[in-house]
Image (cartoon, rainbow, N blue to C red):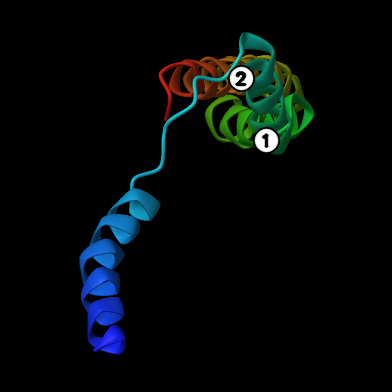
Amino acid sequence: MQRNQTMRNLTAILPLALTFCMVMPVHAQSASDCAARADRAERESNSVMGGAAVGAAGGAVFGAIVGDNRKATKRGAALGAVAGGANNAYQKNKTYKQVYDSCMAGH
């Protein structure tokens, strides 16, 4: 008889305990925690130098095709490096803001 009572109590308590285990509270993170997470995400994204190198290569190819001389190739490489570096810097900043805002929102 004692065993049946214990099983009934366990059967009543177990679903409630599982429900509490499944529902995890969302703790708000501090601004410094979110800044650290955003810094890590920014560092893990592409480098500005990598973007400049890819931009320079693309610009050199474009300059060679369009200009048909060395001066146009050099000019295309320079413009491509500036544009590629600026684009990657923009993307890194965008990544930082996105991760920071998501963290502060509790995601």
Residue identified by numbered label 1: 46
Q: Nearer the viewer, residue 39 or 71?
A: 39
Q: Quadrant of the N terminus?
A: bottom left
**Which image quarter is the C terminus in?**
top left
* Residue situated in front as seen by the camera: 91 or 37: 37
Across and down, in percent, residue 31 comes to: 62, 10
- Of residues 29 and 39, which is closer to you in this image? 29
Q: Is 71 left or right of 87, judged from the image as shown?
A: right
Could you say where residue 79 lies in the image, as x and y percent from the top left? 66, 15
Closest to the camera, between mark 2 and mark 1, is 2
Q: Is residue 5 left or right of residue 30?
A: left
At x 65%, y 27%, the residue is 37
Q: Residue placed at 70% from the left, 38% from the top?
A: 44
- The 10 Å Cα crowd at callout 1, few under 14, some 14 to 19, many 20 or more, is few
Relative to 52, say whether 32 is above or below. Answer: above
Q: Earlier in the sequence, mark 2 or mark 1?
A: 2
Q: Which residue is mark 2?
A: 34
Q: Amino acid at mark 1?
A: Asn
Asked which quadrant contains residue 33, the reply is top right
The amino acid pointed to by label 2 is Cys
